């Protein structure tokens, strides 16, 4: 059996031709470049996918002119955004105003680093993976808050405040629903969690509480990413464009891309925690480890599609209903669920193959 | 209630009212500006008339006079009456508001003020509705002239 | 108990909504209601009463039916039509007769109310089906409807 | 001694926000000056006039045929019903005998217009509460009506199909078939509207109990159309002052008593069913005959005052003509439904959140050119 271990080979090769210090710097730069590319490509692809999926839900055709089936449409949009003028309000806090998009995009990039695409393709496998993800994903909201506050626009400010409220609340549910699954695995390290699922995906292992945890995670994950039906922050029929009202050109594009990358990250976490990450269903392609990327992306895209389906079907909640949903429904359910899960694990009622 | 019965009933309240039915499909009541508010509140509150629905309030420039035409309907009795009031003061016309009787009059009276320049006593928020605050003149008056925007043929 | 029935009902109604959009998603290939406009130009056909612009049909002898009675000009609410007319000698009767010099039509002012066509006694003007009216210069929207050198069709009277 | 300067208009927590004139939820160029405390609305003050064209002044110089086409541009979503209002007023003044065929066709087209307007409203209502897909479903069905209109009238939005004395053209030979096709199509799509939006829990939470208007206030504010009927106020002009062929058909006036946003929504949905049934009753029985009575080329109304009410998709439209016997009206006033419906916005939106205001405005179904005229 041939192990296709590309990353291992590159690592060995780099260290064989260079001194150790230089090699590790070069390696870091290489990884950074690779992840930036992934970031851009995923973002652009997801924007296109969203537009096509929306079109299909809405009896339209969607972008299909630029490139084959419109594949280059978002690329063209990005180029257009690059060439556009960067506007801003007069009495905006210039420093924070310019800083905000980078907060959002850097936090999204950092989260991307710990996502295990496959066994070999995993930039940053730390032993507190889940913990790191939860922590990082809430940093992005600082960017939104800064952007909304510093652009000196009341609509943007309302959007930013809503975002703060929303993230503080839903962070709890995201964390708790992931913790429910950690009860089964007993580890926070993402690669170990996936290894653990060789005996059956966690959503099967944990059966009822796992399914509940998955639903809670998808709902609160959608809320985390500020997507409809939880898009209070943008709420175009209420606030115009919400926190990014005053952003234009590439700064707007950063916010826009980050939203889609965050959606990808939420779907990727769900894939890792509930659907066995890169593992193929029933181990059908276990002999071909490099297919892991395919399985991982397929599952992730499936969940991304689910989130798009939500977005193009449901009306938006109101800001107080958003909080009611979290504090009255999701949080109590989650707390009960975590106890149930603990009981199930304690009584060894998990389903394992 | 028929127009005759209405005329008889309303005629008893105030002696100075004039009634016409010619050239109109409804009963017209002409009232002087001083008695306008009294008559209107009577028309609304009297159990016989119950005109609780002011469906049209139009300002009219009658030439030398400026006036307002109120179209009233009763939603329970389904009879209609038209009340007309005029003022001869074209420079500074003032009438009483009926905003406290029918809430819809607030906007309609602002519209009349905007286009005819009739001021209303006790109106809560009497300012230009459609036009800008610094607009000169009252466009729906017959003597209004605007060489740039108006094409007459 | 209403707490749990609320959750159940909520999820049920949400899934019902998703089934509606999901059905359209699956049948999206044949169900698109939008048209890819410039591509379907050849097959795109307007209804025969479509009001695109006012035209004045001419026959093969370069003759139109407009007598220059100016009824359309009076009927038009926007001053879209201007008829510049002249008096000429009728060849048959030898009398002086009104004839049009230029039938000027300002498309930019036209509201497509059809009053001119409705009022025309000789059916000289009618609706054209052209709807692609955009031009680069506003002056191109002012058109002279009678062709150069055209004259009144014989036998058309007010 | 220092004097403290206190701004009496604002409490310290309140601030002021400009919603519009370019805002997605104001559906046009309406400007709302909101006084807000956090997210709670304290005061709504509409600022109008951004597209005021002074149609009433223009009418004073136009002939009666020309006035009809101006009404297209008021409430452009129920253009045909607006046309009908002016035509009816002129015909009543001239005491013209209108053929039955014209009356029936006018009623059918009026109800089609109402459905088309409600379809658009439904799509936009969904969009205002955040469900963007409804917009396209609503427009899909509206498109069929637009095609019917285009085939018969020649235009899709500003038809100018009615003229004093009848109809400009007879109906197109395909008209009856197309209308029947539409009825079959729409009867399968209306339940879908309910499944997608009406039943949705988020939508119900967003609308039930929001923007409550009591019956007394509805009458006092001159609310009409679905806004009034949702408050239990029977205000359908078609019932109380029937015109054209509406007295030949049986239909129910949809009344709700809750008066909230959801009730207004349901009234409109059910009105679409009622309109469908009106069309069904008439479409097979269009009498033969003339489509137009010849009038003088220059219409001169007798001296006097004439008032005509019709029920547009938004409510009661009144046309008040004062004639001095010339070919132009001395004064022509349009009592537009949107104007009165807008005036109660401040009354029902105060105390709600920004999201509530948007949902409430969506069910008031404002068309700004109708308000600005």
Image (cartoon, helix red, strand yellow):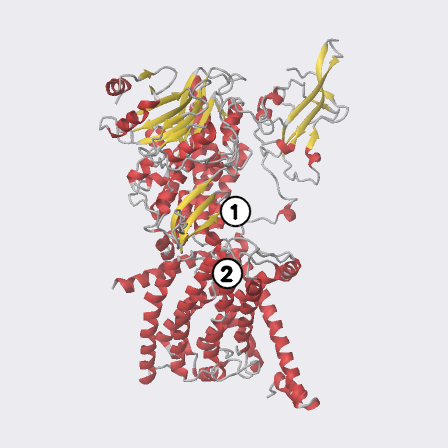
- Crowding near the residue tagged with mark 1, few <14, some 14–19, many ≥20 C-alpha atoms within 10 Å: some
Q: Is the residue marked by circle 2 packed among few (<14), some (14-19), or many (20+) residues within 10 Å?
A: many
Task: Answer with the quarter of the image where residue C121 lies.
Answer: top right
Residue designated by label 2: A148
Do residues under tags 2 and 1 come within 8 Å of each other at their CB atoms?
no
Residue where numbered disc 1 is placed: D22
Can residue D18 be seen in the rendering of this structure? yes
Q: In the structure shown, which secondary structural element does the residue marked by tag 2 occupy?
A: helix
Point out residue C141 in the picture as x, y percentages from the top left corner: 68, 34
Residue at image coords 52%, 83%:
A125
Task: Give percent across and percent down for residue D116.
Answer: 46, 40
B122 left or right of A193 in image? left
- Image quadrant where one finds the N terminus of chain B: top left
Residue D216: percent from left, percent from top: 28, 38
Work out which quarter of the rendered image holds the C terminus of chain B and state it: top right
Can the viewer see residue D96 in this picture?
Answer: no
Per the image, label 1 sits on a secondary structure element best described as: loop
Q: Nearer the viewer, residue D116 or A265?
A: A265
Residue drawn 30% across the image and 37% down it: D233
- In the displayed image of the protein, which residue is found farthest to the front? D1
Mark 2–mark 1 distance (CA, rounded to whole Å): 20 Å
Query: As rendered, which of A168 and C70 lies closer to the eye?
Result: A168
């Amino acid at each position: 059996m041939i192990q296709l271990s590309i990353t291992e080979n590159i690592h060995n090769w780099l260290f064989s031709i260079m001194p150790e210090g230089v090699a590790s710097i070069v390696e870091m730069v290489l990884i950074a470049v690779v992840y930036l590319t992934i970031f851009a490509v995923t973002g652009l692809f997801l924007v296109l996918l969203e537009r096509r999926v929306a079109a299909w839900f809405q009896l339209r055709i969607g972008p299909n002119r630029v490139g084959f089936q419109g594949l280059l449409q978002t690329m063209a949009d990005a180029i257009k955004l690059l060439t556009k003028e960067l506007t801003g309000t007069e009495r905006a806090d210039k420093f924070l105003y310019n800083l905000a998009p980078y907060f959002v995009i850097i936090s999204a990039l950092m989260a991307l680093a710990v996502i295990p695409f496959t066994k070999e393709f995993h930039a940053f496998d730390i032993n507190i993976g889940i913990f790191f993800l939860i922590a990082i994903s809430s940093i992005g909201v600082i960017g939104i808050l800064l952007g909304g506050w510093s652009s000196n626009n009341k609509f943007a400010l309302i959007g930013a405040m809503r975002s703060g409220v929303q993230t503080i609340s839903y962070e709890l549910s995201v964390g708790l629903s992931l913790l429910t699954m950690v009860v089964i695995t007993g580890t926070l390290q993402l690669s170990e969690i996936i290894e653990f699922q060789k005996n059956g995906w966690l959503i099967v292992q944990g059966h009822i509480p796992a399914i509940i945890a998955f639903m809670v995670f998808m709902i609160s994950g959608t809320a985390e990413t500020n997507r409809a039906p939880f898009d209070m922050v943008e709420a175009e029929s209420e606030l115009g464009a919400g926190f990014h009202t005053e952003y234009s050109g590439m700064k707007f594009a950063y916010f826009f891309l980050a939203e889609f990358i965050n959606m990808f990250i939420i779907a990727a976490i769900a894939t890792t925690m509930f659907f066995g990450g890169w593992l193929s269903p029933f181990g059908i392609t276990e002999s071909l480890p490099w297919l892991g990327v395919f399985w991982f992306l397929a599952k992730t895209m499936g969940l991304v599609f689910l989130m798009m389906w939500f977005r193009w079907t449901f009306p938006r909640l109101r800001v107080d209903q958003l909080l009611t949903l979290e504090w009255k429904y999701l949080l109590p359910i989650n707390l009960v669920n975590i106890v149930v899960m603990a009981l199930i694990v304690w009584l060894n009622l998990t389903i394992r193959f | 209630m028929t127009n005759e019965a209405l005329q008889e009933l309303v005629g008893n309240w105030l002696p100075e009212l004039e009634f016409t039915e010619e050239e109109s499909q409804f009963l017209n009541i002409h009232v002087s500006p001083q008695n306008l508010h009294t008559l209107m509140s009577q028309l609304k509150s009297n159990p016989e008339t119950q005109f609780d629905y002011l469906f049209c309030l139009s300002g009219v420039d009658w030439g030398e006079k400026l006036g307002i035409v109120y179209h009233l309907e009763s939603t329970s009795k389904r009879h209609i009456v038209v009340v007309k009031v005029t003022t001869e003061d074209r420079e500074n016309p003032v009438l009483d508001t009926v905003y406290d009787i029918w809430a819809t009059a607030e906007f309609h009276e602002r519209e009349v003020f905007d286009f005819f320049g009739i001021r209303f006593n006790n109106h809560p928020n009497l300012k230009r509705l459609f036009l800008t605050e610094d607009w000169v003149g009252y466009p729906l008056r017959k003597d209004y002239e605007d060489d740039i925007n108006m094409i007459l043929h | 108990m209403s707490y749990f029935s609320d959750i159940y009902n909520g999820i049920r109604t949400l899934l019902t909504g998703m089934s509606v959009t999901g059905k359209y998603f699956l049948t999206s290939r044949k169900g698109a209601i939008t048209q890819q406009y410039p591509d379907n130009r050849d097959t795109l056909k307007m209804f025969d009463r479509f009001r695109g612009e006012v035209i004045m049909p001419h026959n093969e002898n370069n003759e139109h039916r407009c007598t220059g009675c100016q009824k359309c000009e009076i009927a038009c609410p926007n001053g879209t039509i201007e008829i510049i007319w002249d008096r000429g000698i009728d060849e048959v009767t030898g009398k002086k007769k009104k004839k049009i010099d230029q039938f000027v039509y300002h498309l930019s002012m036209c509201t497509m109310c059809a009053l001119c066509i409705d009022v025309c006694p000789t059916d000289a003007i009618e609706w054209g089906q052209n709807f692609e009216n955009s031009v680069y210069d506003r002056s191109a929207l002012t058109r002279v409807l009678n062709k150069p050198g055209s004259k009144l069709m014989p036998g058309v009277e007010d | 001694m220092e004097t403290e300067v206190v701004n009496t208009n604002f409490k310290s927590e309140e601030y002021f926000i400009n919603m519009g004139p370019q805002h997605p939820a104001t559906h046009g160029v309406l400007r709302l000056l909101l006084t807000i405390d956090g997210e709670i609305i304290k005061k709504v003050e509409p600022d109008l006039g951004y597209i005021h064209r002074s149609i009433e002044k223009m009418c004073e110089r136009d002939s009666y045929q020309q006035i009809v086409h101006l009404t297209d541009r008021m409430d452009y979503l129920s253009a045909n019903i607006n046309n009908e209002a002016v035509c009816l007023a002129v015909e009543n003044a001239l005491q013209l005998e209108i053929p039955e065929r014209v009356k029936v066709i006018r009623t059918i087209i009026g109800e089609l217009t109402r459905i088309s307007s409600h379809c658009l409203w439904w799509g936009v209502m969904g969009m205002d509460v955040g469900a963007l897909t409804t917009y396209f479903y609503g427009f899909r069905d509206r498109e069929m009506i637009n095609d019917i209109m285009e085939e018969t009238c020649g235009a899709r939005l500003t038809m100018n199909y009615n003229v004093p004395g009848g109809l400009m053209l007879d109906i197109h030979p395909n008209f009856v078939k197309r209308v029947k096709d539409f009825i079959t199509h729409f009867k399968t799509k209306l339940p879908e509207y309910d499944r997608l939006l009406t039943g949705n829990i988020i939508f119900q939470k967003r609308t039930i109990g929001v923007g409550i208007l009591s019956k007394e206030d509805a009458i006092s504010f001159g609310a009409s159309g679905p806004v009034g009927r949702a408050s239990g106020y029977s205000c359908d002009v078609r019932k109380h002052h029937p015109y054209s062929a509406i007295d030949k058909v049986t239909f129910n006036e949809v009344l709700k008593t809750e008066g909230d946003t959801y009730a207004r929504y349901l009234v409109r949905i059910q009105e679409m069913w009622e309109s469908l049934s009106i069309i069904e009753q008439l479409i097979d029985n269009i009498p033969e005959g003339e489509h137009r009575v010849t009038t003088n080329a220059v219409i001169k109304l007798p001296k006097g005052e004439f008032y005509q009410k019709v029920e547009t998709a938004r409510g009661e439209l009144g046309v008040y003509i004062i004639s001095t016997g010339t070919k132009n009206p001395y004064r022509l006033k349009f009592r537009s439904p949107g104007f009165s419906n807008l005036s109660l916005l401040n009354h029902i939106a105060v105390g709600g959140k920004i999201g509530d205001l948007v949902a409430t405005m969506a069910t008031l179904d404002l068309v700004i050119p109708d308000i600005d005229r």
